[in-house]
Image (cartoon, rainbow, N blue to C red):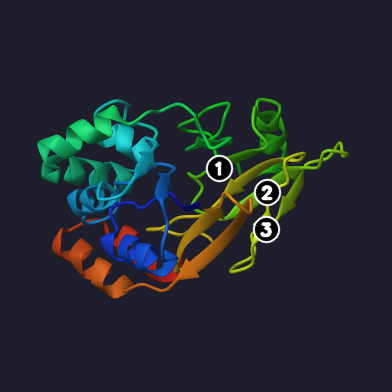
Amino acid sequence: MRILVISDIHSNLAALDAVIKDAGAFEQIWCLGDVVGYGPEPNECISRLREYNLICLAGNHDLAVAGKTALWDFTPDAQEAIFWTRHRLASFNHDWLKSLPDTPLVAAGITLVHGSLRDPIWEYITEKSVARNNLELITTPVCLNGHTHSPAIFRKPWDGMYVLEESLPVNSPIRLIPHDLTFINPGSVGQPRDEDPRAAYAVIDLDAMTLTHHRILYDVSATQKLMKQAKLPNRLIRRLRFGQ
């Protein structure tokens, strides 16, 4: 069984469609949150996801658009995009966002979370010290997380005391070792922040117990054009070109 793992789409339909096309055949999508926010096509992204067999978590932007979290922790640009999204989101898509779970889920023996196990919505796992504290809470060998917009692996080997921070290779399967404890972040579909503007995603083969990370070019200029037409903040438009 092949699973498409995605996170942080942020209303970027061009990136989402490029990922779905590039991934090939799969039986299910696991989305780690932030379907909306920042980008110009929130309704279209929700509709596309719901065409598939889907498990989807709420991210902080999803909760903000749904009115389930306060806005003061967001930057002014993010707040502007959230307000814009609220006014353009169809009522049934608003209800769908509001229904998304905001706590970790377990699927096929793998934990899914947006932020971290310690703080499922807001905490960024970007350092080994943060990963170490969260690995103490893990109940499955592997936990998939998003939120940072940067691909990463934090792993505690079964015979080690230390947490290792590793790069996530592109187009090269890695084994999901059952005796290790591992956090894996597939990166962002719609707004990468690792200085690589290509959309990021992963595919899990549950039969082989492997995960393969992928990057794919998409039409960044098409998304930027729609953002300009919507008069979304210039900084959000520019950063797509540079993956920042």
Residue 133 visible somewhere in the drawing? yes
Residue that mark 1 sits on:
144
Residue that mark 2 sits on:
176
Image x and y of residue 215, in percent: 49, 68
Query: Closest to the observer: 2 or 128?
Result: 2
Query: Closest to the observer: 77 or 212?
Result: 212
| Tag 1: amino acid | Leu
Q: Residue at x 39, y 71 (%)?
A: 241
Image x and y of residue 216, in percent: 44, 71
| Tag 3: amino acid | Ile
User: Could you tell me if the residues under marks 1 and 2 are in contact, i.e. CB atoms within 8 Å?
Assistant: no
Residue 1 against residue 55 in the figure, above or below: below
Q: Decide which of tag 1 and tag 2 comes sooner along the chain.
A: 1
Residue that mark 3 sits on:
174
- C-alpha distance separating marks 3 and 1: 14 Å
User: Could you tell me if the residues under marks 2 and 3 are in contact, i.e. CB atoms within 8 Å?
Assistant: yes
Look at the numbered disc 2 and give the secondary structure of its residue.
loop
- Of the residues tagged 1 and 2, which is closer to the observer? 2
Q: Residue at x 19, y 31 (%)?
A: 95
Query: Closest to the observer: 214 or 62?
Result: 214
Q: Residue at x 32, y 31 (%)?
A: 100
Can you tell which quarter of the image residue 151 is in? bottom right
| Tag 2: amino acid | Leu
